[in-house]
Amino acid sequence: MEKVYVTREGLEKLKTDLATCNARRMKVAATIEQARGYGDLRENSEYHAAKEEQAMLHARIRDMEDKLTRAVFIEDQDIDATKAYLGAQVRVLNKKTNKEIVYSLVSPLEMDMARGRISVQSPVGKALLGLSVGDTAVAKVPAGDIVLEILEITR
């Protein structure tokens, strides 16, 4: 079984999402029971919609439970904070555009590009991981190489 490394925040969010999905599962089951009372199941759109939602919800719950069983929380004392690591915020300078960007390096489950949270498995995340302040990273992306200089690493 492959481990899934997560931050404390990511682990808590996963647990909260799982609890929300489990609560939703009960509501969907009640909707299915109610829709059964509407008659012929072959032509009952409410029933089929609820069954489809139930199937998707169960798949999502199984996926989250699997990730939780494989989740490994990274302890702060286990980390060399002089290098970019899972959970770090890395301020970089894009050498081509001459703009500074701050990325939070997170696990694939915590990725949120809109908030600057990039996966350590993404091209940019892989390029930054393990480097120190002053190092230059080259991320190979479909649009070409992105050259980033690491300016600061914080928690």
Image (cartoon, rainbow, N blue to C red):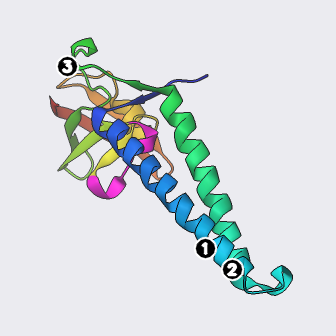
From the viewer's side, name the closer residue of 13 and 84.
13
> Could you say which quadrant of the image residue 147 lies in?
top left
Quarter holding the C terminus is: top left
SS assignment at label 3: loop
Q: Name the side, left or right, on which 117 lies relative to 35.
A: left
Query: Which x, y percent locates residue 46?
Result: 68, 82
* Part of the protein shown in magenta: 107-115
Nearer to us: label 3 or label 1 = 1
Amino acid type at mark 2: Ala
Image point 69% across, 68% down: which residue?
Answer: 52
Label 3 or label 1, whichever comes before in sequence order: 1
User: Is residue 6 in the magenta section?
Assistant: no
Residue of label 1: 31
| Vertical arrangement, residue 94 with respect to residue 69, above or below | below
> Mark 2–mark 1 contact, CB under 8 Å?
yes
- Specify the quadrant of the image occupied by residue 131: top left
Q: Which residue is mark 2?
A: 35
